[in-house]
């Protein structure tokens, strides 16, 4: 699964809109939208926020494995 689909899956698993997910992470709607469309990738700080969000919501998030799957 590529990273943009992983971000979308995390959001949908929690039944959140892109706006709600963005608010949870402290980013803008457009940022989440760009992640999900594959236009950009989150920086290190935002990846940490996604990881923390996943841990809080009992969602598996292993960046190393996810990135290896894309190769």
Image (tube, rainbow, N blue to C red):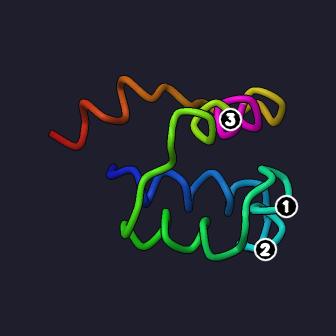
Residue 42, numbered circle = none
Q: Is residue 53 magenta?
A: yes
- Image quarter (top left, top right, bottom left or bottom right) of the C terminus: top left
- Judging from the image, what secondary structure is the residue with disc 2 in? helix
**Of 26 and 60, which appears nearest the observer?**
26
Residue numbers of the magenta segment: 49-54
Q: In the figure, is residue 60 to the left or right of 14?
A: left
Q: Is residue 59 magenta?
A: no
Image coordinates for residue 62, horizontal then vertical, percent? 49, 25
Q: Residue at x 56, y 31 (%)?
A: 61
Q: Quadrant of residue 70?
A: top left
**Disc 2 target residue:** 19
- Asked if labels 2 and 1 touch by Cβ distance under 8 angstroms, the answer is yes
Q: Residue at x 84, y 53 (%)?
A: 24
Image coordinates for residue 53, horizontal then vertical, percent? 76, 37
* Residues at marks 1 and 2, CA–CA distance in whole angstroms: 6 Å
Q: In the figure, is residue 36 to the left or right of 32?
A: left
* Residues at marks 3 and 2, CA–CA distance in whole angstroms: 19 Å
N-terminal label among 1 and 3: 1
- Asked if labels 2 and 3 touch by Cβ distance under 8 angstroms, the answer is no
Image coordinates for residue 37, horizontal then vertical, percent? 42, 73
- Judging from the image, what secondary structure is the residue with disc 3 in? loop
Q: Residue at x 75, y 27 (%)?
A: 55
**Disc 1 target residue:** 23
Q: Quadrant of residue 8?
A: bottom right
* Residues at marks 1 and 3, CA–CA distance in whole angstroms: 18 Å
Q: Label 3: few (<14), some or many (≥20) within 10 Å? A: some
Q: Residue at x 39, y 50 (%)?
A: 3
**Of 4 and 60, which appears nearest the observer?**
4
Magenta portion: prevailing SS class = helix
**Disc 3 target residue:** 59
Q: In the figure, is residue 26 to the left or right of 29?
A: right
């Amino acid at each position: 699964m590529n990273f943009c689909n992983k971000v979308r899956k995390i959001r949908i698993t929690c039944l959140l809109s892109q706006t709600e997910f963005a608010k949870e992470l402290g980013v803008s709607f457009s940022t989440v939208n760009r992640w999900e469309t594959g236009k950009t990738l989150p920086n290190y700080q935002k990846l940490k926020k996604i990881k923390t969000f996943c841990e809080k919501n009992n969602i598996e998030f292993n960046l190393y494995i996810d990135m290896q799957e894309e190769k």
